[in-house]
Amino acid sequence: MFQQEEEEEQALVDVCMGVCFRIYQLQSCAECVFIPYKYFGRKSIWLGTTTRWGSMGCTVTFVQTEFLHHRISTAAAGDDEEREIPEIILGARESGLDIRYATISDGFPLKFDREANFEEFWGSILRDFPGRVDEFLGRITAAENCDGGVPPSFLVADTTYLWASEIAHKYNMFSVSFWTEAALAFSVGYHLDLLKLNAHFPIVNNVLYQNIIDAYEQVKKADFILCNTVQELEPQALSALNQKQPTYAVAPPISPVDCQKWLDSKPHGSVLYISFGSTIETNTQLIHEIAHGLMLSQQRVNFIWILRRNLVRITSDDDDDLLPPGFEDCVGDRGLVIPWCNQSLVLSDPRIGCFLTHCGWNSVLESIWHGVPMICFPLSVDQPTNRKLVVDDWKIGINLCDDQTKQISRQQVAQKIDHLMSSGITSLRREIKKVETILHRAWAADGSSNGNLDRFLHDLKAKTHSKSSAN
């Protein structure tokens, strides 16, 4: 898990580096403060970008919480020793980027269990953390002014930080909201007023859902929106958003990776990869039905299953074991059940034939990037919307449940797996090859993602000059 968080942080640094490199190319010195959303272990699609950077005329301050800095740095060191600056930051500096690293307390001791006490923790993040960010920005702004330097020009913060625009504008900074999911999901949330007006949106008494609703209102105060998607895949949603606010599809590419040793003995296209993400809870009833479906499979499909005990709710006294009796003996060497893996590494391996996924947006993009068709089983949040894109719009996956309102059955699991891992995968492979090509073209040097990032920075530069002239 710590390795995953280190890779996520590398990905977030890559985004900073990309923005700063474009500013440098535009010959515009600026300072950016980047505050990522790091509390749910989101799997990032930007693992291991290997671009080499030259001398750059801008500065980035990458802000991390003390808690996550401690976890990542001690894990990287392999013992209890804590590194002052992560290696990935040092590597970025060695590449020529002027990137600074800072930590802010989230208000809790390092040993406080943030997952077990989520509502208390997240309530404090909403209530108290903005004050710490405000104080931090005040310090670095004052320091730059005293030294005759350039104060921060813009703040890049995750959309879920609903206080970001207010704090940015307080310090005369442009507010850049960074949305890490699909543009369609963002558009749905952006137009919640219409859903409420037509009674399409249920009232959920939950601190996270309320935060999401508030965030969609607050994002309307941002100066710019960056979206982790590709222009060619979601043109309608992006066009609708651009009629409201400047929105740029700037998803960076996924780097190629090597195979895992377990896969070496399996035939090409023969392995089913199963993962329902790292944040949303499932239950033993669901896990057992999938397990029985794998045992019932007539194709005797090879599989890698990512299964974490802390994300499985025990639904009865008889279900204390995550997997049903006899499962291990039945599947033998054709199955590998592990708590975590490098997902991009696995999906890049040619032995992977299909991905049974919860339709988290990063998982969808990774699957497309590596040309792996999907069996979709959305659980919550934006995942049903992503399922629509995969199954109905792009036709690169199928539903695990034909009726999304009914519970899953083991017979259905076996049927869908057998169908897709045999004759049913041909048409999906043909369609996903088309979408994969679109994605790779968009992420090329002259593709739409880089073009949109350039357009965003040109617009930002124009606004900065306009503000300077007015002053």
Image: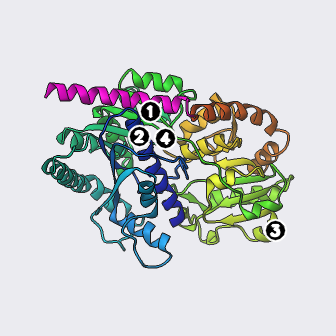
Image quadrant holding the C terminus, namely: top left
Tell me which numbered mark, 3 or 1, is placed earlier along the sequence. 3
**Crowdedness of circle 2 by 10 Å Cα count: few (<14), some, many (20+)?**
some
Pointer 2 and pointer 1: residues touching (CB < 8 Å)? yes
Identify residue for label 2. 19
Give x and y (percent) for residue 252: 52, 40
Mark 4 to mark 3 CA distance (whole Å): 37 Å
Determine whether, in the image, residue 98 is placed left or right of residue 451.
Answer: left
User: In the image, is residue 460 part of the stretch drawn in magenta?
Assistant: yes
Identify residue for label 1. 453
- Magenta span of residues: 445-471
Disc 4 marks which amino acid? Glu
Disc 2 marks which amino acid? Val
Pointer 4 and pointer 3: residues touching (CB < 8 Å)? no
Which of 134 and 19 lies nearest the eye of the viewer?
19
Tell me which numbered mark, 4 or 1, is placed earlier along the sequence. 4
Image height check: is 273 above or below 169? below
Mark 2 to mark 4 CA distance (whole Å): 19 Å
Give x and y (percent) for residue 269: 80, 48
SS category of the residue bearing label 2: helix
**Crowdedness of circle 1 by 10 Å Cα count: few (<14), some, many (20+)?**
many
Disc 1 marks which amino acid? Leu
